[in-house]
Amino acid sequence: MKNHSCVVLFSCLLTVLAGLVSGQAMDGNLVGSITDSSGASIAGANLELENMATAVKQAAQANELGVYRFTNVPPGRYRLTASMQGFTSAALENVAVEANRVATFNLTLAVGAVATTVEVRESTAAIDTTTAHVTTSYSGRQVQQLPLTGIGAGPTNLGVINLSLLSAGVSSSGGVGYGTGPSIGGQRPTNNNFMIEGVDNNNRSVTGPQVNISTEAVAEFTLQQNQFSAEFGHSTGGQFNTILRTGGNGIHGALFEYFQNRNLNAIDQAFKRQGITAAPRYDQNRFGGSVGGPVVKNKWFYFGNYEYNPLGLASTTAGAQLAPTADGLRLLDGISGISRRNLDAFKQFTPVPPAQLGSRTVPVRGVNVPIGVLQVVGPAFSNYHSYVVTSDYHLSDKDQIRARYGYNRQNTVETRALPEFYTPVLFRVHIASLSEFHTFSPNLANEFRVAYNRCVEDRPVGPQQFPGLDAFPNLQFNDLSLILGPFGSYPQGSRNNNIQLVNNVNWTRGRHALKFGYDGRKQNSSNFFVQRVRGDYVYTTFERYLLDLTPEFAQRSVGGFPYIGNHFQHYVRRRRMATPSQPVFDTGLAV
């Protein structure tokens, strides 16, 4: 009871600390200094940051050292204006603000009359002089125009995340270790952290992202490789963060289509190895559209994107598999001493090769049984839908509300088995967040966010039955390079629900910006995956199976039960960020 009280007290302490941060998970920061022509600081200078797409403005004031800071700035292009009584005003156009990055822009004001015209200059490249972050950002234009792989149907296609392969120190996961996604600095992909505007988007079963965002709905994609701050202490690998598009004062829309079919493709070698010379079916017509604009001009904006990717194709096995020909099956019917049960089950679920492969045979009780290559061409499909909706509402100069929703839906078929054992696969995933940003004063700002995501996966096996067994096993015949049965890892499924609560505060004092933050997550999981739940049996020869002898390898789990559990995570951090060229102090704690 005493230990339980300590845990409750500690959790309350973390919540109190949360009340004191402006996380950079979905926004950027803008800092700099205001000086006169002699280099002296101008205390109290007024600054205004205007979004060039929405005309929404933020105000700040330089402190006694002439230093200013804008926090919780959505990525985009801005106009930065500085003014002070007795000085000419100055402005920078096209100031680029990127997520997860602190940009430094200094302004110089000349002595002049109040009515002097504002001096406008094009901004230079944004430079982060306050942190040691190694960050790579890709704009929405780059996302849409650079060629990408893995943008087709399916939850395992990474889409914009593949852009990270253009960065130094990033490679594909091949040979590095288990996990989905790129390898950062030689680490396993399981060490990566995937976010959508700071919201947890990690698939906890096979790693990788849970929701995949259409490239048309991405405003910016960023990767932090190392030296990242404590709010990214969830993982030691890459920090992948996707920023969603929002609407502006103008109505903008787009339609897109990606078309590919069998008449545009060469024949895959997997089909050629089985003697199939005509192009099998492959019809993909990926299309969708997006629209964004104002609900109330200069105040409330919306954006929506929909993508549909139907894919119909003919599927085959990864390598050539052998089986007795029609003549071989007739010979087997006449051989005495073999298990009729085993032979009948094999004949029921295995296709018959059209011809013998050269003079290839397998011996069964002294009889050479001719075998051939299975011509496996099974019908397969994938119907994939992706939705993204965003809304940004500016209550006032001090309050902003942002809502985000993403949804993936896929129905497909598992084809990593003989066609008789193809099974339907269902995938559904939702992610939603609601954020509120409040500016108490030019030196104090708060960010509050609540998020929810849910993932449902069903990967069953079919109704096929093996005589005398309660489930159809995986039967492997080494001399035929053949596996009989459903896909080896099935059945499996999961139900995952995750609630996330984030509160961050940013307090600027003098040359220092202090940050305190809390990130709490509650996950409810119900998963079923038991290795060899149906049994794995490996026969060196097909003859041994027909004679009903003990296989050389035989394993089956005692039973299969789902995992059901609740997982609580608590993260608290403290960070001191100095003004440009000064050091950063960063600490974090996870429970």
Image: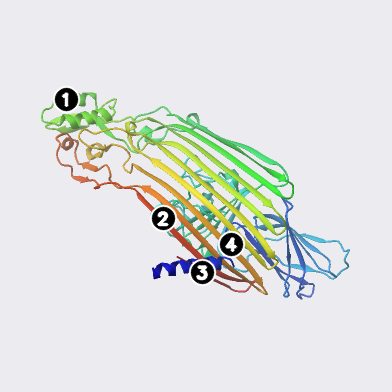
Question: Which circle's residue, 3 or 2, is located before the other in the chain?
Answer: 3
Residue corresponding to mark 2 = 566
How far apart, in angstroms, are the residues tagged by discs 2 and 4? 26 Å
Q: State which quarter of the image contains the N terminus.
A: bottom left
Residue at disc 2, secondary structure: strand
**For the residue carrying disc 3, how many other residues have a C-alpha within 10 Å: few (<14), some (14-19), or many (20+)?**
few
For badge 1, the amino acid type reads Asp
The percent coordinates of residue 3 (x first, y second) are 39, 69
Q: Is residue 390 visible?
A: yes
Q: In whole angstroms, how far apart are the C-alphas of marks 4 and 1?
A: 72 Å
Q: Nearer the viewer, residue 393 or 5?
A: 5
Q: Is residue 290 above or below residue 378?
A: below
Out of 212 and 457, give the one closest to the viewer: 457
Label 3 and label 1: CA atoms lie apart by 76 Å
Comparing labels 3 and 4, the label whose residue is closer to the camera: 3
User: Badge 2: few (under 14), some or many (20 or more) residues near its Cα, within 10 Å?
Assistant: few
N-term-proximal mark, 4 vs 1: 4
Q: Amino acid at mark 3?
A: Leu
Disc 3 to disc 1: CB gap under 8 Å: no
Element on which disc 3 rests: helix
Amino acid type, residue under disc 4 in the picture: Gly
Which residue shows up at 46% across the image and 50% down it? Answer: 497
Sequence order check, earlier mark of 3 and 4: 3
CA gap, disc 3 to disc 2? 22 Å
Assess whether mark 1 and mark 4 are in contact (beta carbons under 8 angstroms): no
Residue 13 bears which disc, if any? 3
- How much space separates mark 3 and mark 4, taking CA atoms? 19 Å
Where is the C terminus found, in terms of image quarters?
bottom left
* Residue matched to label 4: 23
